[in-house]
Amino acid sequence: MEKFIVEKSHSLKGVIDISGSKNAALPILAACVLTDGECIIEGVPPLNDVTTMLELIRELGCKTSYEGETISVRGKDIDNLTLDYNEVKKIRASFLLAGAMLSRFGRADIALPGGCSIGLRPVDLHLKGFEALGAVCENEHGIIHIRCEKLKGCEIYLDFPSVGATENIMLAASLAEGTTLIRNCAAEPEIADLADFLNKMGADIEGAGSDLIKINGVKSLHGCHHRIIPDRIEAGTFMLAAAATGGKIRLNNVCTAHMTALIHKLREAGAQINEEENSITLEKRGKTVNTCIKTMPYPGFPTDMQAQFMALMATGRGTGIVNETVFENRFMCAGELTRMGADIKVEGRCAVVKGVRELTGTAVKATDLRAGAALIISALAAEGKTEIGEIEHIDRGYFHIENKLSGIGARIERRSYED
């Protein structure tokens, strides 16, 4: 077991190269199961979630290699269509393999998925999509058994623009007979990146990035070469860390169009931001001006940035309000921030943040991935020393975050509990 020791760090300054997107890499790795050809994916950070997904597709029978940040997957020898709970429970994205297996082989047996405990995330919309395409789904002792003779295109309306359900239906419909329309679907950049990858494999997908996706089923798919998009959540986390410490940083390998909502809110909070084609510069001086944020499906403010923005406002001027509309249990970091001296009141899906003069370091724990990132941001701005435990959650989405932060002047180090 490891922990982070963080000390107050003034004015983070420097340049950071942003990694490829974890949330784009995972569905793309699942898509590799759709073909017996070789798929080469570049720009994939060696995160715990990525290695877990590789373990899962190897369990199916895929051959994989991982050198640097390039992954090669060949699905020619798949001979197992059953995935048990021990691996599936580790990441939510494991359930995306259901759509790929169903599409190519007509069956899948997979345990209900795991991931961060940030609220109820049922797979009913995924199963509703599979059933509309012609599959039969049964839940037996926590294992979902999915079968079909031949998937057939249809029109599907999602009750909520779920990212996972949209991705799973895209995977299933790619090899279906006829045309599938997904209405009220998710529009996140990672959806568009998955569509780009599938089209390179020979799929026929239109409209990804909007609320209507059209998929013309094809008979087979082939291998391809692809580089995933930059991680907008990692980029946002470093921007907030710099803002919290009154610093100035430049981020390379970013797509600013994917970060519009966050950029607008940071400007409201007093940050100066300069956008270029593939880079962004942020400078922040003085107290944060607390504001209101409301998480929404893309292009709204991302739920994955809510905790980090709350950490920024903890020492801001005035009162900020956070309205969480995506997940019902995503304020777990509020209690940990309160231990550091923050004034946060949570009622239902709303949190009221009254800025305090300063936070103080203490022992806290990362309750989930983004809450862990929020605690790092607060610790960098807090007086004294902060010990952050359960950092395995943080490692799921940030590869050695302490190294990138240290490179711009942060006082943060990883230690084992034995130390």
Image (spheres, grey):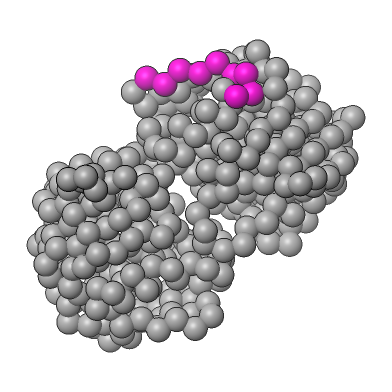
| Percent position of residue 390, x then y | 35, 53
Segment tinted magenta in the rendering: 59-67
Residue drawn at (14%, 63%) of the image: 385
* 76 sits left or right of 143 in the view: left
* 205 sits left or right of 71 in the view: right
Q: Is residue 128 visible?
A: yes
Magenta stretch containing residue 60, yes or no?
yes
Name above or below for residue 223 compared with residue 401. Answer: above
Q: Is residue 251 visible?
A: no
Placement of the C terminus among the 4 image quadrants: top left
* 302 sits left or right of 218 in the view: left
Q: Nearest the camera: 218 or 130?
A: 130
Placement of the N terminus among the 4 image quadrants: top left
Residue drawn at (73%, 62%) of the image: 159
Q: Quadrant of residue 6?
A: bottom left
Name above or below for residue 59 compared with residue 312. Answer: above
| Percent position of residue 180, x then y | 79, 42
Q: Nearest the camera: 253 or 363?
A: 363
* 306 sits left or right of 206 in the view: left
Magenta stretch containing residue 342, yes or no?
no
Q: Quadrant of residue 87?
A: top right
Residue drawn at (81%, 29%) of the image: 106
Residue drawn at (63%, 40%) of the image: 85
Name above or below for residue 375 compared with residue 323. Answer: above
| Percent position of residue 15, x then y | 18, 45
